[in-house]
Amino acid sequence: GRGAAPVKAPEVDPVAEAGKLASGAADLGALRDALAGYEHCPLKRGARNLVFADGVAGARVMLVGEAPGRDEDLQGKPFVGRAGQLLDRMLAAVGLSRAESVYITNVLPWRPPQNRDPKPDEIAMLLPFLHRHIALADPDLLVIMGNTSCQALLGRRGITRLRGTWVEAAERPALPMLHPAYLLRNPQAKREAWADMLSLKAKLRALE
Ligand code: URA
């Protein structure tokens, strides 16, 4: 008959597409725009806002969290809820702040529904953006908070074993640390978090 066979949409590889967009971004503003225009991640559809970053772009310390929660999704900024307030207090204890000396982002720029764990394919397609984000912000040091972030940047889970030991990630020294949301649920673990903050401060001094 005359009916044409249904035209199949060309297959796009979301990871390759992300890589192309990310590497084409010449600065942080362009990277943010590229993420905002990236349509292959299902998380985007359920989120209210893109949560890109907060703090000082170009700071010596860059913190990488997991994913926006409810407050972050509403405000479009990372770490503004309870975990974020705890994080700010921990940073302040060693003389750091997002107003002056740290830059903050997450592995995922969109809130997962009901705060569920991100799926491996979601992490995989957002990873090129994260790597470009780190390269453009170019911090001296990374702090990797929580299991999702360790999985994404180190390819390993087990934050309670990984924390506190400097490793390399994205071509620079990186410190895995307990996530502040974990510290809210397990206040006894604040000892370890305090040790990690001191280790961060010492590393900054050593590299000065
Ligand atoms: N937890 C995260 O990992 N990131 C945020 O932005 C808020 C809470």
Image (tube, grey):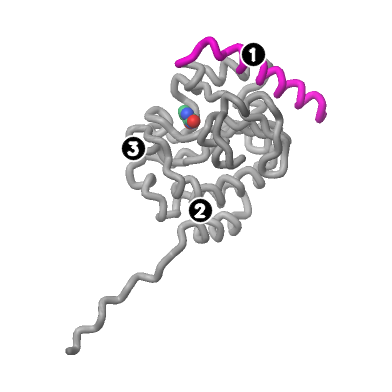
CA gap, disc 3 to disc 2? 22 Å
Residue found at x 47% / y 25% = 80
Residue type highlighted by circle 2 = Ala
Residue found at x 72% / y 35% = 173
Taken as a whole, is the magenta stretch helix, strand or loop? helix
Rendering coords of residue 186 (x, y %)? 49, 14
The region drawn magenta spans 185-208
Q: Nearer the viewer, mark 3 or mark 2?
A: 3
Rendering coords of residue 42 (x, y %)? 37, 49
Residue found at x 40% / y 37% = 111
Which residue is label 2 attached to? 34
Rendering coords of residue 147 (x, y %)? 52, 32
Which residue is label 3 attached to? 113
Q: Give the camera-side residue of 33 and 22.
A: 22
CA gap, disc 3 to disc 1? 33 Å
Q: Nearer the viewer, mark 3 or mark 1?
A: 3
Dot 2: what SS?
A: helix
Which residue is label 1 attached to? 93
Q: Quadrant of the C terminus?
A: top right
Judge left or right: residue 12 versus residue 98.
left
Q: Give the camera-side residue of 188 and 20.
A: 188
Residue type highlighted by circle 1 = Ala
Residue found at x 41% / y 36% = 117
Earlier along the polypeptide chain: callout 3 or callout 1? 1
Q: Give the camera-side residue of 1 and 129.
A: 1
CA gap, disc 1 to disc 2? 36 Å
Dot 3: what SS?
A: helix
**Marks 3 & 1, CB-CB < 8 Å contact:** no
Q: Quadrant of the N terminus?
A: bottom left
Q: Nearer the viewer, mark 1 or mark 2?
A: 1
